Amino acid sequence: MRRIDLREITQAVKELSIEANTIANCDLRDALTASIEKEVSPVGKAVLGQLIKNQDIAKFTNLPICQDTGFTVVFLEVGMDISFTGGIVQDAVNQGVREGYIEGNLRKSIVKDPLTSPVNTQDNTPAIVHIELVPGDKVKITLMPKGGGSENMSRIKMMKPSDGVDGVREFILKTVKTAGGNPCPPIIVGVGVGGTFDYVAFLAKKSLLRKIGERNRDPEIAAMEEKWLLEVNKLGIGPAGLGGKVTALDLFIEVFPRHIATFPVAVNIQCNAARVKTRII
Ligand code: SF4
């Protein structure tokens, strides 16, 4: 049994919070660069160029890629041959977020009680923490600061089983069309299908951890991802919603078995500031 002091988790989460908000991943930068070629609108091309420039400035100045530094969502894959010492895992994660957002001068966006006391917690905690037990003696930490604008345009629908695959396609296209320029396109479309009302949203969120261009392992679902991405890009929303061909950089689908009487679908929209960083301890 390997012992891990939870201070290591705190330190990693702190560093990932700053890194995720200031350094864009290569796959995102490459996808934006490639999309300039595909875009036909001169305004759209200019927007894409500005987004890349913004990422470069953020990286070299240590400033956030976007002023909205998000709700911090943390996915932990914890090896079953690990024993944590020094407290509770969730507390260690929150402490890392707290230290990272304060030291990194990142905007604090979380209010305490949404109904009775919408007062800022001043340190961007609590984080949303998803924990999964896996074989082995390592911990994989994946941190995603999720912007409010794109989260607001995300949707869930409990469809009828008879709505079928066509119903899923229609729901995705309708959600993206309704979102228009609000979620800061070019977006990434994360889709969950199956499970329960709560789990389908998790699936959609988890799909957004994939690198751009990474297809579902099931070839049939991978084909749907490619086909529906093309359809999304025919909606004409374009970069920043100013019209054009590049509305989305990718579309990911994650599935799970469903109840015979239900057909849950979730569309979690990610914005151009798609921030995901990972570390293995
Ligand atoms: S949706 Fe994304 S890019 Fe737009 S303001 Fe929010 S975090 Fe920034």
Image: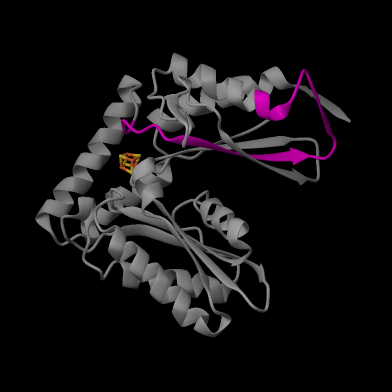
User: Compared with residue 92, is residue 43 higher up or lower down, i.e. above or below?
Assistant: below
Here the colouring is one colour
Residue at x 48% of width, y 20% of height:
123
Whether residue 227 is visible, yes or no, is no
Quadrant housing residue 281: top right
Residue 277 belongs to magenta span:
no
Residue projecting furthest to the top: 103
Which image quadrant shows ligand 1?
Answer: top left
In the image, the segment drawn in magenta is 65-91
Residue 147 x/y as whole percent: 39, 40
Whether residue 30 is visible, yes or no, is yes
Residue nearest the observer in this picture, 213 or 172: 172
Q: How many labels does the image show?
A: 0
User: Compared with residue 183, is residue 227 higher up or lower down, i.e. above or below?
Assistant: below
Residue projecting furthest to the left: 42
Q: Is residue 27 left or right of residue 50?
A: right
Residue 171 x/y as whole percent: 41, 71
Residue at x 30% of width, y 35% of height:
55
Residue 46 x/y as whole percent: 14, 47
User: Compared with residue 207, is residue 98 higher up or lower down, i.e. above or below?
Assistant: above
